[in-house]
Image (cartoon, helix red, strand yellow):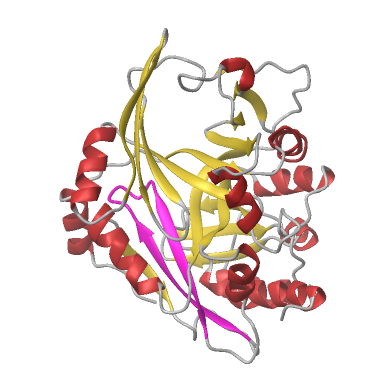
């Protein structure tokens, strides 16, 4: 595992030409946005926020915006065939289209990234209504995924121009989800390093952690991963690629069923993972199962933790430690019928890493699910 030295970190921070303030929203293209919104409200505890569709003058699509604390999802579905959204869903199934990032200046963000080699998706455009203006722009990244730059410092509306407030009598309680911790992308064979270079050159990110097939492997499969972070650490994008193994890796399975590169999972932070996971399970969310033997020796590896081990064992929550603290994490099963997109729930108790010590247990669990699907 490779880490940066402090001088490198300071240098990366001082030359940050693309200051980011975190994730603004994650937008999913889905087959039925109304039903998807109901699912995320019911199962994950999101609240209704905003809506755009035929009633607001949008004729080709509808979008429902849902929010929980600092976590905002947009669910978009096409109303007709023969358009980009419908084609995207036909090819990939439901999945992440836009990873939208908060910036002070969306015009400068577009200019900085495109002059460094980024492929433009959207030139800067200003959206206005009575509540002010939002400026947005965007560039392409791996697969058909897009980074939008969102500048909303001069906007006081519910979400952005073109949307109206979505009020609902059905407002389930939240589950303690806070914000996007990181988003993981799966790319094709030998494509990890080119995309690492893209994030370094185009967006000014740095590679803060690297895992090779010795770090992430089981008896049957392996993958490689590098974690990219922006200057202030608010935005982190691990990138995975397959590695040679006896059988098909989880990344290969994803690429086969998603029909290309894309977002594998969104990691969401919580302040109390035990309470959050208990509530998510009560609402029907399924998580990967971890062998009980994992917990027999885990404290020998990670040392003392604040939590009682028994509820972690019962829920299947994983534990890992680095030099700055420890973390607790758990992974859902795929949220779609295709074995593609899933979610990670994570609570950091000082740790800045990504659970290297859990990789073997996690990937053996993933392989058991693959085997059940006949895809290992």
Query: Relative to residue 132, is residue 222 depicted above or below?
Result: below
Give the quarter of the image for residue 200. Answer: bottom left
Nearer to the camera, 333 or 35: 35
Nearer to the camera, 65 or 288: 65
Q: Residue 195: percent from the left, percent from the top?
A: 36, 66
Residue extending farthest to the bottom is 246
- Name the residue located 56 percent from the left edge and 82 percent from the top edge: 222
Q: Main secondary structure of the magenta part?
A: strand
Residue extending farthest to the top is 130
Query: Relative to residue 115, is residue 372 depicted above or below?
Result: below
Q: Which stretch appears magenta?
A: 221-243
111 on left or right of 98: left
Locate the C terminus by quadrant.
bottom right
- Name the residue located 77 percent from the left edge and 16 percent from the top edge: 169
- Name the residue located 73 percent from the left edge and 48 percent from the top edge: 277
* Residue 227 covered by magenta stretch: yes
Q: Residue 34: percent from the left, percent from the top?
A: 72, 32
* Residue 19 covered by magenta stretch: no
Locate the N terminus by quadrant.
bottom left
Give the quarter of the image for residue 51. Answer: top right
Query: Relative to residue 6, is residue 267 depicted above or below?
Result: above
Give the quarter of the image for residue 296. Answer: bottom right
- Name the residue located 63 percent from the left edge and 50 percent from the top edge: 89
Whether residue 65 is visible to the viewer of this picture, yes or no, is no
Nearer to the camera, 215 or 252: 252
């Amino acid at each position: 595992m490779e880490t940066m030295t402090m001088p490198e970190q300071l240098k990366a921070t001082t030359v940050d030409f693309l200051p980011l303030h975190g994730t603004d929203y994650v937008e999913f293209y889905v087959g039925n946005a109304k039903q998807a919104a109901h699912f995320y409200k019911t199962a994950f505890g999101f609240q209704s926020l905003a809506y755009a569709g035929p009633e607001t003058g949008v004729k080709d699509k509808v979008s429902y915006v849902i929010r929980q604390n600092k976590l905002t999802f947009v669910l978009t579905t096409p109303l007709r065939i023969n358009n980009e959204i419908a084609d995207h869903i036909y090819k990939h199934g439901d999945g992440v289209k836009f990873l939208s990032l908060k910036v002070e200046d969306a015009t400068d963000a577009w200019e900085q990234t495109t002059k460094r080699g980024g492929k433009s998706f959207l030139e800067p455009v200003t959206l206005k209504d009575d509540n002010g203006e939002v400026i947005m722009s965007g560039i392409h990244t791996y697969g058909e995924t897009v980074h939008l730059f969102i500048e909303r410092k001069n906007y006081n509306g519910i979400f952005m121009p073109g949307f109206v407030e979505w009020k609902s009598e059905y407002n389930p309680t939240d589950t303690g989800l806070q914000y996007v911790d990181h988003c993981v992308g799966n790319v094709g064979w030998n494509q990890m390093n080119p995309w690492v270079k893209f994030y370094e050159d185009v967006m000014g990110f740095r590679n803060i952690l690297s895992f090779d097939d010795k770090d992430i492997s089981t008896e049957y499969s392996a993958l490689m991963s590098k974690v990219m972070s922006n200057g202030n650490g608010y935005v982190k994008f691990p990138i995975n690629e397959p590695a040679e193994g006896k059988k098909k890796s989880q990344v290969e399975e994803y690429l086969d069923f998603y029909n290309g590169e894309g977002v594998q999972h969104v990691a969401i932070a919580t302040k109390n993972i035990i309470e959050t996971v208990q509530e998510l399970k009560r609402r029907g969310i399924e998580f990967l199962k971890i062998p009980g033997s994992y917990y027999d020796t885990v404290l020998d590896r990670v040392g003392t933790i604040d939590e009682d081990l028994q509820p972690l064992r019962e829920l299947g929550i994983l534990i890992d430690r680095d030099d700055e603290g420890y973390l607790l994490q758990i992974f859902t099963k795929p949220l779609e019928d295709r074995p593609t997109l899933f979610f990670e729930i994570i609570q950091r108790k000082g740790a800045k890493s990504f659970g290297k010590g859990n990789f073997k247990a996690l990937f053996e669990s993933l392989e058991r699910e693959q085997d059940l699907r006949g895809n290992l």
